[in-house]
Image (cartoon, rainbow, N blue to C red):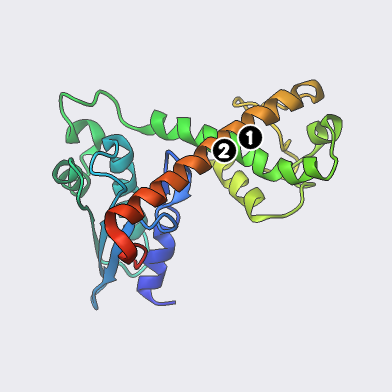
Amino acid sequence: MSLRDSVWTALGTVLDPEIDEPITDLDFVASCTVSGDGAVSVHLRLPTFFCAPNFSFLMVADAYDAGSAVEGVTGAEVLLDDHHASAEINAGVAAHAGFVRTFPGEADAELEEVRRYFLEKAVMAGQDRVARPLVDDGAGPDELAGLTLGAAPPSRDLNRLRVRRAALGLPDGDDAPLLIHPDGSRVSADQVPLHLRRARLTRAGLEANGDICRNILATRYGAAAGTG
C-alpha cells in the first residue's frame, strides 16, 4: 500500500459527527496528496458555506490527527475550503489551539460533549441496523433482549456498532447485550419494542441527513465531486 493510500485509509476513520459517516464516503475530501518526502496536504469541502463551525472544526481537526498519525508522514496540512469560517478553523487546527481558543468569545467549551452526543445517536442507530434483519426474520422481544454481540450474525454493521460503543466506554465484548440503554444497561424484553422504535427513528434521521448532504454537495460542486 502506498503512503497516499494509507493516508486515505486513515481519513476514512474520520466521521461527520452529525451523520456518523466517513468523510471519504461523503466526498468531503476534495483532494489528498503526499509529496516525495512524506508531507501530506488534504483539502476538505462541505455541502454548504454555512455548515456548523463546531462540526466543521471536528472534521478538520480529526483529519489532521488521522493523517499525521500515519507511519511515514513527515507533516500534515488539512485545509477547509469554501466555508465562512475557513480561515479561523484552518488556523486553529494548524496551531493546535482547540475550539475555544479558535473562536474566542464565541465558544465556551471544547467539543467532546458534542462528539459524545452524536456517538450515542450512532450507537442507537447501530442497534437498529443489527437487530432489524433479526426482527424481519421473526425474532421476538425475549430473544432480542437476551442476544449478545457475540451471538449476533457477523456483519459490517455489527463491527461498526462495537467500535462506536468502545469509543463511548460502553460494553462491546462478545458477552455484551446487543440492545442497551445509553448508560450501558441491558434493555429488558418488555422495553424492546419501544427501544427499537426509537432506534429505527434515530437511524432514519441519520440516513436522511446523509442523503441530503450528498445531494447538496453534488449540486454545489457538480459532477467533479468524489474525485478525491
Q: Is residue 162 left or right of 104 when viewed as pictured? A: right
The residue type indicated by label 1 comes to: Arg
Residue at the disc numbered 2: 204
Q: At which x and y percent is residue 45?
A: 28, 53
Quarter of the image that includes the C terminus: bottom left
Between residue 210 and residue 156, name the one nearer to us. 210
Is there CB contact under 8 Å for labels 1 and 2?
yes
* Residue 188 placement: quadrant: top right
Q: Is residue 119 left or right of 151 when viewed as pictured? A: left
Q: Is residue 103 left or right of 193 when viewed as pictured? A: left
Distance (Cα) linking label 1 and label 2: 6 Å
Residue at the disc numbered 1: 200
The residue type indicated by label 2 comes to: Ala
Q: Residues within 10 Å of mark 1 (few under 14, many from 20)?
A: some
Judge whether 45 appears above or below 5 on screen.
Answer: above
Q: Which mark is residue 134?
A: none
Q: At which x and y percent is residue 26?
A: 41, 54
Q: At which x and y percent is residue 179?
A: 71, 33
In the image, what residue occupies the spot 28% across and 65% down? Answer: 31
Q: Is residue 95 left or right of 209 when viewed as pictured? A: left
Between residue 16 and residue 77, name the one nearer to us. 16
Judge whether 179 appears above or below 82 on screen.
Answer: above
Q: Is residue 222 visible?
A: yes
Mark 1 residue element: helix
